[in-house]
Amino acid sequence: MVRDDLDQWVYAFKNNEVPDEFSAPGIGALKEKFDYLRMDEGERRRFDKHIDYARSEWGMIEDARQDGLEEGLAKGREEERGILIKSLYDNGMAIETIATSVGLAEPAIRQLLDNMSDS
């Protein structure tokens, strides 16, 4: 008779199976392992190949997501710097002083201000 989580684990190990209605914490992983071990060699190879492919796909998706996040953050910082530069200029600070303060060359400051006034 299976009454609690411990009984589910004992049953599973004694019978090398996990019935679908079992819900003890972590027992789902044991069910997956038993299912894997019941596969023949060909099924295991196909399954392993599928898992490797899925992991590779998820890795590529995660890399692309991280790249997009970094690109978006960089763009946001650049926009903030442009707003700061425009604010300093609009409040009378000389372009030479702005360039020294933010670490950009004067032509880059002038171009940024021109681009901001165009939009």
Image: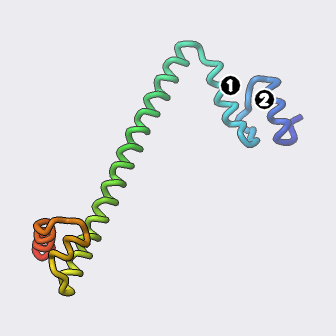
Badge 2 vs badge 1, beta-carbon distance below 8 Å: yes
Corner quadrant of residue 28? top right
Residue 53 vs 98, above or below: the answer is above
Q: Position of residue 116 (x, y in %)?
A: 15, 73
Residue 50 vs 7, above or below: the answer is above
Q: Amino acid at mark 1?
A: Phe
Q: Quadrant of the C terminus?
A: bottom left
Question: Residue 13: which disc?
Answer: none
Residue drawn at 21 percent across, 75 percent down = 98
Q: Nearer the viewer, residue 32 or 62?
A: 62
Q: Amino acid at mark 2?
A: Ala
Residue 113 vs 78, above or below: the answer is below
Residue denoted by label 1? 34
Residue drawn at 31 percent across, 65 percent down = 77
Q: Is residue 118 left or right of residue 15?
A: left
Corner quadrant of residue 13? top right
Q: Secondary structure at mark 1?
A: helix
Q: Is residue 98 left or right of residue 32?
A: left
Q: Is residue 71 left or right of residue 98?
A: right
Residue 106 vs 73, above or below: the answer is below
Corner quadrant of residue 73? bottom left
Label 1: few (<14), some or many (≥20) within 10 Å? Answer: some
How many angstroms separate mark 2 from mark 1 (CA)? 9 Å
Residue denoted by label 2? 12
Residue drawn at 47 percent across, 27 percent down = 52
- Nearest to N terminus: mark 2 or mark 1: 2
Residue drawn at 70 percent across, 35 percent down = 20
Q: Position of residue 21 (x, y in %)?
A: 73, 39
Q: Nearer the viewer, residue 96 or 87?
A: 96
